[in-house]
Image (cartoon, rainbow, N blue to C red):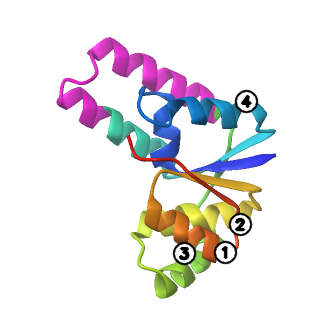
Amino acid sequence: MNVFFDSSALAKRYVEEKGSERVEAILSFAAALGVSVICLPEVISALCRRRRERRLSKNQYADAKRALILDLEDASVIGMTDQVIARSVELLEHWRLRSADALHIAGAAEWSAQLFVSADERQCRAARAYGLRVEELKPG
């Protein structure tokens, strides 16, 4: 199964929180992992925030960053193509979304994801309405 992860869900792989076990379970049966080109900076941003809040040590941050980069080496990273941009505009015109959330949904749709995984309730509602099969993880 081709599984597309939003940053909010994929971050749970690198920081233990509610939903982390489910992320591991989904990844164990995924044939392919898809992410948006903005996933790396978004997950790094979340890790840096935790480091600033002293919820991650310098070594934990480095380990998490290294694991993320290794995972993305094997992933399909969906870029900002004309089609992805057009889909994201359509999504923004129909649902109350942040631009990054629309880009993730658009990338998943363009990649023909068989499952879209997110921890953002509003994004999940829009993705379902857009025709994607969705698994919503509870925020951590």
Residue carrying label 2: 110
Q: Distance between the residues labelled 4 and 1?
A: 30 Å
Q: Distance between the residues labelled 3 and 2?
A: 10 Å
Relative to 17, say whether 45 is above or below. Answer: below
Residue 70 falls inside the magenta stretch: yes
Q: How far apart are marks 4 and 3 (CA)?
A: 29 Å
Q: Which of 81/45 is in front?
A: 45
Labelled pair 3, 2 in contact (Cβ < 8 Å): no
Q: Which amino acid does label 3 sit on?
A: Ser
User: Relative to 52, is 23 on the left or the right?
Assistant: right
Labelled pair 2, 1 in contact (Cβ < 8 Å): yes
User: Relative to 11, is 50 on the left or the right?
Assistant: left
Q: Distance between the residues labelled 4 and 2?
A: 23 Å
Residue stretch rendered in magenta on the structure:
48-72
User: Relative to 93, is 98 on the left or the right?
Assistant: left
Disc assigned to residue 88: 3
Q: Residue 118, percent across and down? A: 53, 52
Give the secondary structure at mark 3.
Answer: helix
Give the secondary structure at mark 4.
Answer: helix
Residue 59 falls inside the magenta stretch: yes
In this rendering, the label closer to the viewer, 1 or 3: 3
Labelled pair 4, 3 in contact (Cβ < 8 Å): no
Q: Main secondary structure of the magenta part?
A: helix
Mark 1 surroundings: few (<14), some (14-19) or many (≥20) residues within 10 A: some
Residue carrying label 4: 28
Chain-order first, disc 4 or disc 3: 4
Residue carrying label 1: 83
Q: Which amino acid does label 2 sit on?
A: Glu
In this rendering, the label closer to the viewer, 4 or 2: 4
